[in-house]
Image (cartoon, rainbow, N blue to C red):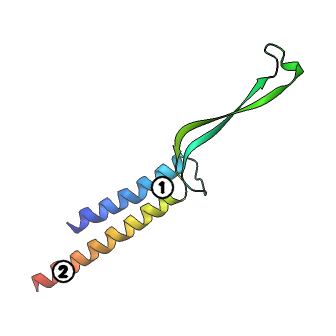
Amino acid sequence: MTSALRILALVLLLASIGLWQHHGFRLGFWQTSVQVETEVPIIEGMPKLGTQRKIEWKNQFVSGIETPLAGLLAFLALMILAQTLKRRLKKREN
C-alpha cells in the first residue's frame, strides 16, 4: 500500500514536470489563450507599400510555474501519507 502511494507520488511529480517542460519551462502563470501575430500588407498584393501587424488570440492552454509546484505539493502530501500509514501499520504489528 505504501509503496503504491510512493510510486503514485513520483509519477505525479514527473508528469507535472514533463507537462511544464512540454510547454517551455514558463516561469509565468497559466495561460488559456496565446497571442498570434501575423504581418498583413496594407494593400493586397503590394507588400512593398507597407505591412501592419494583425493580432489574433488562439484558445490554448499553456502551463506555468504552478504546474510543477502543484505536482510537488501532491508529491509531498502523498509521501507524508505513505509514511504515516507505514508507521500505523508497524504499530499494529507490535
Q: Amino acid at mark 1?
A: Ile
As rendered, which of 11 and 59 lies closer to the eye? 59
Which element carries disc 2, helix, strand or loop?
A: helix
Image quarter for residue 45?
top right
In the image: residue 51, left or right of residue 88: right
Residue lying at the far left of the rendered structure: 93
Say the numbered circle drawn on residue 40.
Answer: none
Give the labeled residue for mark 2: 88
Determine contact: label 1, label 2, CB under 8 Å: no
Q: Is residue 59 left or right of residue 47?
A: left
Q: Residue furthest right?
A: 49
* Residue 83 versus residue 68 in the image, above or below: below
Q: Quadrant of the C terminus?
A: bottom left
Q: Position of residue 50 (x, y in %)?
A: 86, 24
Residue placed furthest toward the top = 45
From the viewer's perspective, is residue 21 above or below residue 79? above
Whole-percent x and y of residue 56? 65, 34
Amino acid carrying label 2: it is: Arg
Give the residue at mark 1.
Answer: 17
Upstream in the sequence, badge 1 or badge 2?
1
Eyeballing the image, is 18 above or below 8?
Answer: above
Q: Residue at x 51, y 60 (%)?
A: 66
Question: What residue is at 32 percent from the left and 68 percent from the top?
Answer: 78
Comparing 22 with 90, the one in front is 22
Give neighbour class at mark 2: few <14, some 14-19, many 20+ (Cα, 10 Å).
few
Question: Which residue is painted at 31% across and 59% down in the image?
Answer: 8
Label total for image? 2
| x and y percentages locating residue 1 in the rendered image | 19, 66
Give how far across and how far down residue 59 sits, in percent.
53, 38
Q: Residue at x 16, y 78 (%)?
A: 89
